[in-house]
Image: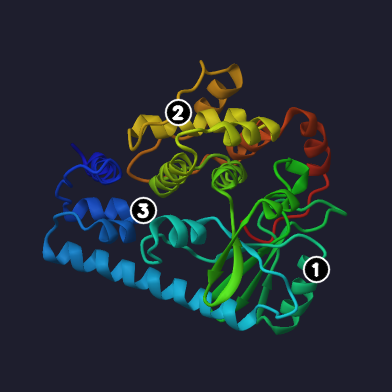
């Protein structure tokens, strides 16, 4: 068994409540590449002292960065603004893992539909030390779906929608209206409903052209487990959203990847369609080093994942696209 398989076996045993296998130092290096080294310390498998010390250092660094992000949020959130929706990695860390050091996050993702989004954008544009352009493609005349605001090394990303609207998917209004109340750093916030947590995970996968690592698959496994616990195993609400937003192909590809690791019992999928087989062929296999598709394949996957009714518009607008400020 190589280091990648050893790491997968550890994650599988933890998720399934089985005895934890010993983790060698070399497997922690693979865990770092897959963004789960802090999670290894959270799990606490048998390992030698230097390996445990390295895992603890990574966990401590991640927990410290999460604390800086929440303190910055508490200090900068305008008192005149409604509670934002906290989603993606921070939601997983706070509400599923309940351990800020176990999930690596580079920023704090917040969602707030208009007109409140524009208000906070204006306030933060005056106070932030750095304002960053949207990550995804930006087309002429299309409003930004998000913007990044940094105070020193703390980056808060303010979304008005989960992804650019020309790519479809749920709107910011949709997920915000279904969100649930919570608290972060003493301030009122919202968190996604259990079905929407999975949908937002899937939308993020589509934005990244299905470039997956073990951290992504653990997030999916945990989100599915939380949903099933809340609904007595029913995935009806999730299935309805996946169908409503034309996410079925991406959903089936991701479920098969989850099933291939056997981390949890993944929902069954129908026989792969031609589109799903093409997506599999274009995507790199999951292995010791996470890989991103070549630029040409990345764009091909992204176009294939766009709902059919929107593809012509994406191609036409792409010819007039501005260069992304960052990816």
* Disc with the residue nearer the chain's start (3 vs 2): 3
Residue 270 appears at what percent x and percent y? 51, 18
Residue tagged 1: 118
- Mark 1 or 2: the one toward you: 2
Residue 8 appears at what percent x and percent y? 28, 41
Distance Cα–Cα, label 1 vs label 3: 37 Å
Residue at 71%, 78% (x, y): give it. 124
Residue at 37%, 64% (x, y): give it. 99
Is 67 displayed left or right of 145 in the figure? left
Residue tagged 3: 33
Where residue 11 sits, quadrant-wise, is: top left
Mark 3 Cα within 10 Å, few/some/many (few <14, many 20+)? some
* Disc with the residue nearer the chain's start (1 vs 3): 3
Residue tagged 2: 267
Where residue 202 sits, quadrant-wise, is: top right
Distance Cα–Cα, label 3 vs label 2: 27 Å
Mark 2 Cα within 10 Å, few/some/many (few <14, many 20+)? few
The answer to whether residue 300 is visible is no
- Mark 1 or 3: the one toward you: 1
């Amino acid at each position: 068994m190589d280091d990648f398989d050893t790491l997968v076996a550890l994650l599988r045993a933890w998720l399934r409540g089985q005895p934890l296998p010993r983790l060698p130092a070399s497997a922690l290096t693979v865990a770092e590449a897959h963004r789960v080294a802090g999670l290894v310390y959270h799990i606490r498998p048998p390992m030698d002292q230097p390996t445990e010390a390295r895992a603890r250092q990574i966990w401590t660094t991640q927990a410290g960065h999460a604390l800086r992000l929440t303190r910055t949020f508490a200090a900068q959130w305008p008192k005149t603004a409604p509670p934002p929706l906290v989603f993606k990695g921070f939601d997983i860390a706070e509400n599923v893992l309940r351990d800020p050091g176990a999930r690596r996050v580079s920023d704090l993702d917040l969602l707030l539909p208009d007109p409140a989004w524009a208000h906070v954008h204006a306030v933060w544009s005056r106070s932030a030390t750095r304002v960053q352009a949207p990550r995804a493609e930006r087309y002429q005349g299309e409003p930004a779906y998000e913007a990044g605001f940094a105070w020193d090394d703390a980056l808060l990303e303010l979304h008005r929608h989960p992804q650019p609207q020309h790519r479809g998917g749920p709107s910011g209004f949709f997920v915000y209206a279904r969100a649930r109340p919570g608290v972060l750093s003493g301030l009122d916030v919202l968190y996604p409903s259990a079905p929407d947590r999975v949908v937002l995970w899937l939308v993020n996968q589509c934005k990244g052209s299905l470039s997956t690592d073990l951290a992504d698959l653990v997030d999916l496994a945990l989100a599915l487990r939380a949903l099933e616990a809340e609904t007595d195993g029913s995935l009806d609400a999730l299935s309805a959203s996946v169908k409503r937003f034309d996410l079925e192909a991406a959903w089936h590809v991701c479920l098969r990847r989850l099933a291939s690791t056997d981390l949890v019992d993944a929902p069954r999928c129908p026989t792969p369609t031609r589109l799903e087989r093409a997506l599999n062929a274009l995507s790199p296999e999951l292995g010791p080093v996470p890989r991103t598709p070549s630029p040409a394949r990345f764009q091909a996957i992204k176009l294939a994942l766009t709902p059919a009714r929107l593809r012509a518009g994406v191609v036409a607008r792409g010819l007039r696209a501005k260069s992304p400020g960052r990816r």
